[in-house]
Amino acid sequence: MRKFLLLLAAIVPAFLPAASRAVDEIKILPSRVKLDTTKSDKGNTYVESSKIVYKVEVSSSSFSELTNVIVKYNIFYQVSELGRTGDPEVKLSTGSHAIPSLLTNRPVEFETDPINLAKGALDAGWYFDNGASPTIRDKVVGLWFKAFDSTGKQIGEYTNPASVTQKRKWKD
């Protein structure tokens, strides 16, 4: 039985999909940062608009320096409008950042382009004749980052949620 298990342990890796070591050596970690907030109260509606960015930390556990790394991103977010019925519109923010030199265990940080997200509501006792919701809340529905080396080969990826790769299409 022991010989069978050893034989099985030697054979199984040959049937597993090949994985690039370099993809595992690049870590991309975004964190959300609120820049500023504006509030407006017009008539019977209240709207609060916030500008956000993602601070992205890119690190390498490779034993050698990586040069000319490009990190590209797609941020998918829903935008709602007070008084509008139907599903909210999904918008996309894209961008990239060049990293001239990425050293082992020395992370590099950058910020994405700002995105405006709003939340709002009608005053108490008010409603829309068309049946639209009396409240709105914009939200980020997907983050997708890819890192490429100087030859254009993908060496890292981050998605949140993981299903964003099946639900959305990558855009450069």
Image: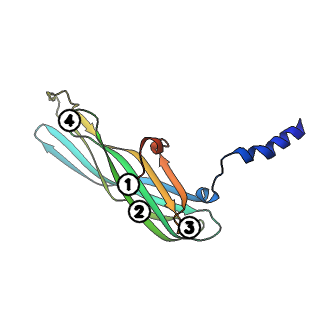
Q: Residue at x 15, y 38 (%)?
A: 45
The vertical placement of 87 against 161, above or below, is above
Task: Please tell me in which quadrant of the rendered image residue 94 appears.
Answer: bottom left
Q: CA distance from mark 1 to mark 4?
A: 29 Å
- Give coordinates of residue 118: x percent, y percent: 26, 45
Q: Quadrant of the C terminus?
A: bottom left
Q: Residue at x 45, y 68 (%)?
A: 98
- Give coordinates of residue 9: x percent, y percent: 80, 43
Disc marking residue 33: 1
Q: Quadrant of the N terminus?
A: top right
Which structural element holds mark 1? strand
Q: Which residue is mark 3?
A: 106
Which structural element holds mark 4? loop
22 or 118, which lies in front?
22
Q: CA distance from mark 3 to mark 4?
A: 48 Å
Label 4 Cα neighbours within 10 Å, binned few <14 / some 14-19 / many ≥20: some
Marks 3,4: beta carbons within 8 A: no
Type of amino acid at the residue the image marks with label 3 = Arg
